Each structure stands twice: as structure tokens, then as C-alpha cells.
């Protein structure tokens, strides 16, 4: 339990000095200003050694905590509130997107989920919500998530000079793809690019902001993601570069127009290879083909799938690079293949 003395502001210095002299000032937390219907107060953080009252003011349990330095871990903050067995299940990782914390909490900690959320917010005083993650589902990549604490699930995540507005309970955002988003931001200058699985603009936005291609056609099938894609085009001032298209890329992608096609989707991406190759200009262009693949097949299967599609269309291919993006699940990698297609 974290303790504090709540006092009127004019008593601040006197009580702080008492706490220093009595060696019970908690120097890991900040002195907080609190405003409620009774007025404005200061909360002086103290340790257990403060006892029940200080200078006539009761020692209370502090509801919202602000640490001077982030504590070492969530587990450490929860010591004393959770049993040893429960502590063993406390996650050691989570994501911060904009001002929202996203965390996957095991079912054994169901009853502690609000305490975990409250503790996380105290570690990140600039965040305003905590959302529990249950994974991503289906072709439209819709996340299953529950708001645990806070005031909303829409946020603007800033990354690499770009803004990504999103509702974290409606659309996905893979932190693990950061390097690939940065790489895409260096490609496409003076080209026509088709992004077949645009989402909220994961690859289209950094490419448009930094490389400024002649044109990017960004296709997205999920209306909720599409709404954010349009919003992000506006937020990043790239309306002159990106044309958003709501639809299925197998039907909505133009034929014979692109210098480069981005296929940032995993699971069944190979089903879209022929459509992607047809989208490239007649004399060819470059594909960025994503696939999730068992580690042992990573050097062969994606390449073979591209070759099969290319041959069935009477074209040629040179595989330029196979890059590992991240570990997708145990024994499975998310890779991207850069392939040059020729007539
Ligand atoms: C996995 S997300 C993109 C993730 C991204 N690579 C990242 O960095 O996080 C892929 C998007 O493709 C969309 N999608 C799936 N099938 C589609 C199709 N046939 N045509 C257009 N969009 C599609 C999904 O709705 C989803 O928003």
C-alpha cells in the first residue's frame, strides 16, 4: 500500500520538513496536487514509518501515484498487494500506443485486472487508459480488447514523424513492424505504389510523409480501418499523394499501373500474389510480399510461392532479399520478401 499525507497547500513545506526529519518521506514518488469538491490539497508521499498521523493530519492510502523514476517493474509495484503465486503470472511486457496502455493479462489474474490497470497508470502518469488484449481475429484483423480503466480507447500514436489515429479496440497496430514501417518510408520516390492491405495507413503514411511517391493507392476492406486511414491521410497532410480505396484489393487494385506493390498482410497473402503481379506495370516492378512461415521453411516457401505465381503469369522474378520482421508465434516467423518481377 502506498501512503501519503493529504494537507492544505500552505502546510506543504512544514509537513515535508517533518517527513524529511522523521526519515519517512518517500523519495520515489512525487508530491501531488489534488483538486476535489473540498478544495485543493497536496499529497506528501510517505513510507510505513509515518504511522497513523503527522502534524495532526491522517496518513491515507494514495489512490493515484506519480513516481519520480519509473519503478523497476509492474511486479515490483504489485508486491504486497498480490500473493507470490499471483505475482508469478504478472506480465513483464505491454504496449503503449499514444496515451493508451495495452496489456495481455492471464485469466488467473482476472480478479486483479483493475488493480493491475491502476498500477500501470501510476507508472505512466501521461497515459489515460488501460486496455486488456485478448488477441487479433479474422481477415479484418479486429482486436478483441476490453477497456479496464480510463477515459476512452481512441488515441493518436506518434512514430517516426507520422501520426496514426486509431481506436485500439477496433483496429490493430503491430509494434513489432516498426522497422518495416521505417524501411517503407525510404522507398517509392517518384513511383506509383499500390498498398493492397492498407489498414489505417501503417506503410502508406510513412512512405507518403518521407519518400513522397508520385501516387499511392491504399486499399482497405475493413470500413473501420478505412475511416482511420482517411483521417490519418488528413492528419499527415498527404492528401495529394494517397488515394484511399474502400474494397477488396483483388477487385479494387488497378491493373498494370504500379511500380511497387506492398502486401502487408499475413496468413493467406499468397492467394493475392497473382492480383499483385497484375497490378505491376507491364514491364514489371517490385513486390513486398509478407508471409508467416515456420522457421524451417522461411528460406524456401515464400520464394517458391512467388515463383509459382510469377510463372503462371508467364513472367520472371529475381528475389532481392528475404527479411525477418519478427517472431510471430512459437516457431513461426513473419518475413517479407522483396522481389523484382520482369516481363
Ligand atoms: C494486418 S493489417 C496490416 C498490418 C500492418 N502490416 C502493420 O504494420 O501493423 C492488414 C489489413 O488488411 C486488410 N485486408 C484484409 N484482406 C483484405 C483485402 N482482400 N483487401 C483489402 N484489405 C484487406 C485488413 O482489414 C487489415 O486492416
Image (cartoon, rainbow, N blue to C red):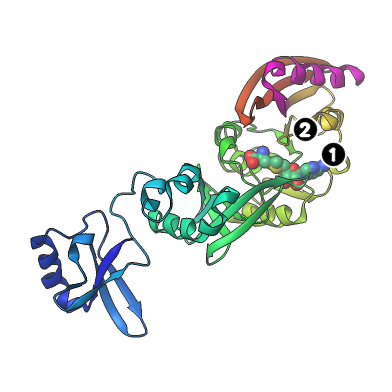
Q: Residue at x 26, y 60 (%)?
A: 30
Q: Residue at x 85, y 25 (%)?
A: 282
Label for residue 325?
none
Helix, strand or loop for disc 1: loop
Q: Position of residue 339 (x, y in %)?
A: 72, 20
Q: Specify whether 158 is left or right of 139.
A: left
Above-or-below relation of 84 to 319: below
From the viewer's side, name the closer residue of 42 and 158.
42
Q: Residues within 10 Å of mark 1 (few under 14, many from 20)?
A: some
From the viewer's side, name the closer residue of 263 and 93.
93
Helix, strand or loop for disc 2: loop
Is 310 contained in the magenta span?
yes
* Quarter holding ligand 1: top right
From the viewer's side, name the closer residue of 155 and 240.
155
Q: Specify whether 107 is left or right of 43.
A: right
Residue at mark 2: 258
Point out the image quarter for the N terminus.
bottom left
Above-or-below relation of 20 to 39: above
Tally the marks.
2
Evaluate if marks 2 and 1 touch, with contact meaning CB atoms under 8 Å apart: yes
Q: Position of residue 186 (x, y in %)?
A: 57, 31
Q: Specify whether 179 is left or right of 40.
A: right
Q: Residue at x 34, y 49 (%)?
A: 70
Q: Position of residue 256 (x, y in %)?
A: 85, 31
C-alpha gap between disc 2 and disc 1 = 8 Å
Label for residue 254?
1
Q: Kindly indicate the quadrant of the structure image that contains residue 62.
A: bottom left
Q: Position of residue 75 (x, y in %)?
A: 41, 46
Point out the image quarter for the C terminus.
top right
Q: Residues within 10 Å of mark 2 (few under 14, many from 20)?
A: many
The magenta stretch is 287-313
Amino acid at each position: 500500500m502506498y501512503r501519503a499525507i493529504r494537507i492544505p497547500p500552505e502546510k506543504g513545506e512544514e509537513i515535508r520538513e517533518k517527513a524529511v526529519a522523521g526519515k519517512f518521506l518517500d523519495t520515489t514518488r512525487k508530491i501531488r496536487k489534488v483538486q476535489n469538491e473540498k478544495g485543493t490539497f497536496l499529497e506528501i508521499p510517505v513510507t510505513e514509518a509515518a504511522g497513523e498521523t503527522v502534524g495532526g493530519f491522517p496518513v491515507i492510502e494514495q489512490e493515484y501515484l506519480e513516481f519520480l523514476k519509473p519503478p523497476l517493474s509492474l511486479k515490483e509495484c504489485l508486491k504486497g498487494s498480490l500473493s507470490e503465486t499471483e505475482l508469478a503470472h504478472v506480465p513483464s511486457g505491454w504496449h503503449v500506443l499514444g496515451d493508451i496502455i495495452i496489456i495481455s493479462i492471464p485469466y488467473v489474474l482476472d480478479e486483479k485486472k483493475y488493480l493491475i490497470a491502476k498500477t500501470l497508470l501510476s507508472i505512466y502518469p501521461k497515459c489515460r487508459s488501460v486496455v486488456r488484449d485478448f488477441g487479433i481475429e479474422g481477415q479484418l484483423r479486429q482486436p478483441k480488447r476490453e477497456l479496464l480503466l480510463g477515459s476512452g480507447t481512441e488515441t493518436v500514436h506518434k512514430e517516426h514523424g507520422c501520426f496514426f489515429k486509431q481506436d485500439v479496440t477496433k483496429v490493430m497496430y503491430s509494434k513489432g513492424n516498426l522497422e518495416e514501417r521505417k524501411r517503407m518510408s525510404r522507398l517509392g520516390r517518384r513511383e506509383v505504389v499500390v498498398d493492397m492491405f492498407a489498414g489505417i495507413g501503417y506503410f502508406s503514411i510513412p512512405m507518403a510523409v518521407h519518400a513522397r511517391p508520385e501516387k499511392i493507392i491504399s486499399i482497405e476492406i475493413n470500413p473501420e480501418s478505412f475511416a482511420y486511414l482517411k483521417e490519418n491521410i488528413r492528419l499527415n497532410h498527404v492528401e495529394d499523394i494517397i488515394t484511399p480505396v474502400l474494397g477488396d484489393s483483388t477487385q479494387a487494385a488497378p491493373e498494370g499501373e504500379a511500380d511497387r506493390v506492398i502486401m502487408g498482410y499475413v496468413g493467406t497473402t499468397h492467394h493475392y500474389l497473382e492480383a499483385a503481379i497484375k497490378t505491376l506495370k507491364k514491364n514489371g516492378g517490385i513486390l513486398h510480399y509478407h508471409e508467416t512461415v515456420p522457421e524451417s521453411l522461411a528460406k524456401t516457401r515464400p520464394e517458391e510461392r512467388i515463383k509459382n505465381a510469377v510463372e503462371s503469369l508467364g513472367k520472371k522474378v529475381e528475389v532481392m532479399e528475404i527479411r525477418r520482421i519478427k517472431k510471430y508465434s512459437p516457431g513461426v516467423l513473419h518475413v517479407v520478401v522483396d522481389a523484382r518481377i520482369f516481363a
